[in-house]
Image: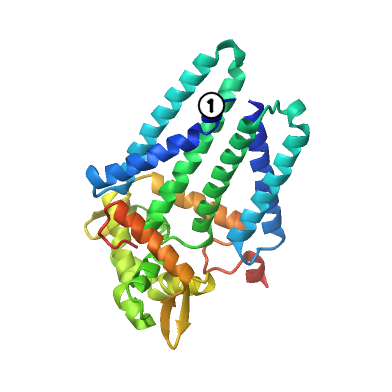
């Protein structure tokens, strides 16, 4: 049980550091900063376990370290992918909130269309591609960078693997 | 702790991915959500069974409280990995950035803003999302008006909104943070 509790304590510590940093000042690159905070806390935690682990947590061998790292990294990644949904507005969630706000009278399609335009839904994501180094703008044309091509190939391959033909989005 | 027992959640996760791919290609061709739920449950059954076998064979050498601790840790690891995987395949299906990257990938010579908006625009996004929300019975269309049906999406939407306000100090990426708003 000590190994499980120790992992939870490390995750909680990382989350507290993250909230403190965010309350002081929002970082420029949220995901990278989150990754840095979580990995730093993990490094300190593993070092602590290595030095005092045998007495405090009953750490016996590589198996325990592996389990702490695997659980911690899995939860860290789960939080970071969830955070990406917090950072930008998901149209589906915005639509559900709009229908919820409309209450028992419901919402017409015109109301959806009024607020959901290219300026709100598409242009910010194109700018994200430029900022994230996935695409570049050259003579008025958007082209993928090598990083963007790698991302595109990965998702195209996975969609082929799952047998998806519809374009999605 | 045996090495194979330590890597069990990662191993079961790999099995879950294979089951999900097979289900998606062979059984539930139209519903990604169903493939994820069924493969997650199948993996969970394998994980619980393997845990039981291990702790049963360990006998008195492992205290019940430690067995419970390892079980919870493995469950947490497996659930978090499955969640990340679900998010990954969902990105390929629904994310606007990924759809834009795929559109650009199909045109190696590049696309102008007008060309991008011709094939992928707010109308397409709205149509896709409304289709998914209606198919998954999160909202319902009655007499030309949309009403909320499923409670899960509204719970998720409110949770995300609360986290946004707590961490970023704003409810939307287009709102100014509260401190800037006041100034």
Looking at this view, is A133 or A121 the one in front? A133
Q: Which residue is mark 1?
A: B71
Is residue B14 at least partly visible in the picture? yes
Q: Residue at x 69, y 28 (%)?
A: A59
Figure check: A139 above or below B93: below
| Left or right position of A94 against A3 | left
Quadrant including the N terminus of chain B: top right
Looking at this view, is B139 or B48 the one in front? B48
Q: Residue at x 64, y 42 (%)?
A: A11
Badge 1: few (under 14), some or many (20 or more) residues near its Cα, within 10 Å? many
Q: Residue at x 42, y 68 (%)?
A: A149
Q: Position of residue B50 (x, y in %)?
A: 45, 24
Query: Which residue lies most toward the top here?
Result: B60
For the residue labelled by badge 1, is the local secondary structure a helix, a strand or a loop? helix
Q: Total label count?
A: 1
Query: Which residue lies most toward the bottom here?
Result: A139
Q: Position of residue A140 (x, y in %)?
A: 42, 86
Q: Quadrant of residue B18?
A: top left
Q: Position of residue A107 (x, y in %)?
A: 32, 60
Q: Residue at x 26, y 60 (%)?
A: A166
Q: Position of residue A78 (x, y in %)?
A: 52, 47
Q: How is the image coloured?
A: rainbow
| Left or right position of B140 against A15 | left
Q: Quadrant of residue B91?
A: bottom left
Looking at this view, is B170 or A23 the one in front? A23
Is residue A111 at least partly visible in the picture? no
Label 1 lies in what chain? B
Looking at this view, is A117 or B124 the one in front? B124
Quadrant including the C terminus of chain B: bottom right
């Amino acid at each position: 049980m000590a190994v499980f509790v120790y992992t939870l304590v490390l995750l909680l510590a990382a989350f507290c550091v993250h909230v403190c940093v965010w309350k002081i000042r929002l970082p420029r690159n949220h995901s990278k900063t989150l990754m840095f905070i979580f990995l730093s806390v993990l490094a300190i935690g593993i070092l602590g376990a290595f030095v005092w682990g045998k007495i405090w947590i009953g750490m016996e061998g590589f198996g325990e370290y592996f389990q702490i790292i695997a659980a911690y990294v899995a939860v860290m990644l789960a939080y970071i992918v969830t955070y990406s949904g917090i950072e930008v507005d998901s149209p589906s969630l915005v639509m559900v909130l709009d229908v919820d706000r409309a209450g028992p009278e419901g919402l017409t399609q015109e109301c959806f269309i009024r607020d959901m335009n290219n300026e709100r839904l598409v242009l910010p994501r194109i700018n994200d591609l430029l900022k994230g180094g996935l695409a570049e703008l050259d003579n008025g044309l958007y082209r993928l960078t090598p990083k963007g091509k790698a991302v595109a190939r990965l998702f195209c391959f996975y969609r082929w693997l799952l047998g998806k033909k519809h374009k999605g989005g | 702790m045996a090495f194979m027992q330590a890597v069990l959640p990662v191993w079961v996760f790999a099995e879950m991915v294979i089951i999900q791919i097979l289900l998606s290609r062979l059984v539930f061709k139209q519903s990604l959500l169903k493939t994820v739920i069924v493969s997650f449950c199948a993996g969970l059954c394998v994980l619980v069974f393997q845990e039981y076998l291990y702790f049963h064979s360990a006998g008195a050498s492992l205290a019940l409280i430690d067995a419970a601790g390892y079980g919870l840790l493995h469950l947490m690891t497996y659930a978090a990995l499955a969640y990340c995987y679900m998010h990954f395949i969902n990105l390929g299906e629904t994310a606007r950035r990924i759809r834009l990257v795929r559109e650009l990938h199909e045109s190696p010579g590049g696309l102008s803003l007008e060309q991008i908006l011709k094939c992928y625009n707010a109308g397409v996004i709205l149509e896709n999302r409304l289709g998914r929300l209606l198919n998954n019975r999160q909202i319902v269309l009655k007499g030309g008006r949309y009403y909320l049906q499923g409670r899960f999406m509204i719970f998720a939407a409110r949770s995300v909104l609360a986290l946004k306000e707590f961490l970023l100090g704003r409810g939307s990426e287009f709102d100014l943070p509260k401190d800037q708003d006041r100034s």
